[in-house]
Image: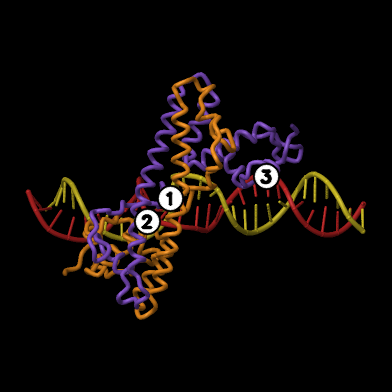
Chain colours: A orange, B purple, C red, D yellow
Amino acid sequence: MALMTIGKLSGATAVKVTTIRYYESIGLLDEPQRSASGQRLYAGASVERLRFIRHARDLGFPVSAVRELISLQVEPGRECVLVDQIARRQLDEVRRRLTQLEALEAELKRMIRACEGGKIGTCSVLAALGQHENCLHEQHDGAEVLAGLPSKGA
Amino acid sequence: MALMTIGKLSGATAVKVTTIRYYESIGLLDEPQRSASGQRLYAGASVERLRFIRHARDLGFPVSAVRELISLQVEPGRECVLVDQIARRQLDEVRRRLTQLEALEAELKRMIRACEGGKIGTCSVLAALGQHENCLHEQHDGAEVLAGLPSKGA
DNA sequence: CCTGCAGTCTACAGTAACTAGAGGGGCAAG
DNA sequence: CTTGCCCCTCTAGTTACTGTAGACTGCAGG
């Protein structure tokens, strides 16, 4: 297949042009050939590499993990178990987030159910937010929300 | 209750000192009194306010939403329905993330199950990541992972 | 009173993973 | 030759903080 510009590569992989350049800048993608005028020219293999990265990112692997995976790919013959470890780590992380989100969903539902269009002074959503535990007047057995949810890692 | 330093407030709310100062800098917290030497001195009400913020953040509300909620709190007598809207928006967001994460969990599990300790050349985790759709050899009905998961908004 | 140390101050830089914009050059079609 | 889209580099902004440097304060022990 012929060489393609960054725009074509972007189109073929659904990764934005700026993001491709960003990946290059952080060393996820090798520097490609350049045309006489300085435009990047990619070979077909770049499509595979970029799809790999994109998919791993979509799965929530941090860039650092993607980097590890790429290095494992590049240097074959090593144990698959390393790759497996990275995937398991990611699965643990995903499950942790799932648990948190389920607790959040429950609490938000409870809050909304209690909000019946009254005035703010009696709004239980605001009241619930002011509480440390037991978000409404009713008890609930310690489905306390974990700290720092979607801030950064999520 | 007596005035307290930022350290005490931090201890009382489990919000880090630096984070408290950050909240002040972005206007989530009012500027407190200062001692003669310039140290921040907080009254008891700050504990409530900060707990409110903390809880809302733990629930995944972005700072912008917390700001809205605070302004609704400060100016009472308005319709509870606005608060309700914010909470519902947040619930939708949480559910969206839940759906994505469930798809991720399924895909990761499938990947790991297929990884039986072989060499990298045949490792299906890496193979799966290279695929655009149908992550393993078996079919699965379009549980395609959505783009840009935990990158920013998540 | 001195020393030491924990606590506080400001201000700036760094994090993750991009996204957006400024200001300019290149290339093919009409 | 001009229009218009594509490409270039570089910088700054995003979100919600966290960490660091360098200096000052407040309090207890000796």
Give the answer, above or below, for where A7 lies relative to A73.
above
Q: Residues within 10 Å of mark 2 (few under 14, many from 20)?
A: many
- The residue tagged 1 is A98
Q: Are marks 3 and 1 on the same chain?
A: no
Mark nearest the camera among 3 and 1 is: 1
**At 43% across and 68% down in the image, what residue appears?**
A85
Give the answer, above or below, for where B118 lies relative to D6.
below
Amino acid type at image mark 2 = Glu
C-beta proximity under 8 Å, tags 2 and 3: no
Amino acid type at image mark 1 = Leu
Mark nearest the camera among 2 and 3 is: 2
Mark 1 to mark 2 CA distance (whole Å): 9 Å
| Chain at tag 2 | B
Q: Are marks 1 and 2 on the same chain?
A: no
- The residue tagged 3 is B11
The disc, 2 or 3, on the residue closer to the chain's N-terminal end is: 3
Q: Quadrant of residue A7?
A: bottom left
**At 27% across and 65% down in the image, what residue appears?**
B136
Give the total of numbered labels: 3
Q: Secondary structure at mark 3?
A: helix
- The residue tagged 2 is B105
Mark 2 to mark 3 CA distance (whole Å): 37 Å
**At 74% across and 32% down in the image, what residue appears?**
B1
Q: Quadrant of residue B27?
A: top right
**At 41% across and 48% down in the image, what residue appears?**
B154
Give the answer, above or below, for where A92 lies relative to A145.
below
Amino acid type at image mark 3 = Gly
C-beta proximity under 8 Å, tags 1 and 2: yes
* Residue A136 in the image, given as x and y percentages of width and height: 53, 31
Q: Residues within 10 Å of mark 1 (few under 14, many from 20)?
A: many
